[in-house]
Amino acid sequence: MSDPRYRRLTELLTGYSTALRKGDRVWIEAAEIPEDFVVELIRAVRARGAEPYVRLSSGRISREIGRGVTERGLRLSLKHELAWMKTMQAFIALRGAQNSFESSDVPSEKQKLAGRILRPVSDHRINHTRWVVLRWPTPAMAQAAGMSTEAFTDLYFKVCNLDYRKMSDSWARDRPAIFDSQHRCDSLRGGEKHSGRGGVYRPGEDQRRGKGDLQRPGGVPRHAV
């Protein structure tokens, strides 16, 4: 039986994060993710009238491909992957990692070559699809957090399955009052400067201020779950 928390999370990914609509084509990329969750996500996509297209991968296989990749092979991949991406309206990536350092011995020149040649694929995905990238809880992540796998997984689902639409609406409603209070406090403290970049962060979000992965729906997205 599937974990009951899976359904709630897939509803968030297909609703709040990517706003799937009838007829949308969705590229699902899953790396080392429980099959039950991928199945639940496929069902959630179809429940919204969208069409799921799935690619499965693993860290060990990606490492082996990366170690011997060539420019010729990458350019062929670019041709087909970019054409495929251009047929999609949404992209959902699920990324697990049993070993955070699995690709540590892939030569840096190979990684840079792949990043440079395949960049148009990610550029199109970022700028022309509604997309989200979800990091999956793994023993490696729990270890990095100094927690047991079970405790970390429980925390992960509690955070990821919050009502982020309600939180966003609340923030939008209360933001003027918050900033006004901040301004008055700054005056009392002698005019300290603040950036004023308030915002509601979704789980794992980097706000696109550098290496952000996760985004929210709408035109050219800017945040995500």
Image: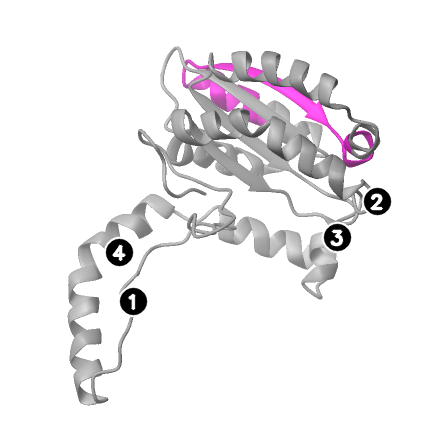
Which sits in the foreground, 68 or 23? 68
Going from N to C along the chain, the mark reached first, 4 or 3, is 3
Q: What residue type is disc 2 on?
A: Asp
Residue at 59% x, 13% y: name it.
79
Q: What residue type is disc 1 on?
A: Ser
Going from N to C along the chain, the mark reached first, 3 or 1, is 3
Residue 101 rendering spot, x and y as whole percentages: 78, 49
CA separation, marks 4 and 1? 17 Å
Q: Quadrant of residue 165?
A: top left
Is the residue marked by circle 2 packed among few (<14), some (14-19), or many (20+) residues within 10 Å?
Answer: few
Q: What residue type is disc 3 on?
A: Ala
Give above or below for 54 relative to 217. Answer: above
Which residue is identified by label 4? 171
Is the residue marked by circle 3 packed among few (<14), some (14-19), or many (20+) residues within 10 Å?
Answer: some
Badge 3 marks a residue whose secondary structure is: helix
Label of residue 195 in the image: 1
Segment colored magenta: 40-62
Which residue is identified by label 3? 140
Residue at 20% x, 68% y: name it.
179
Residue contact at pointers 4 and 1, CB within 8 angstroms: no
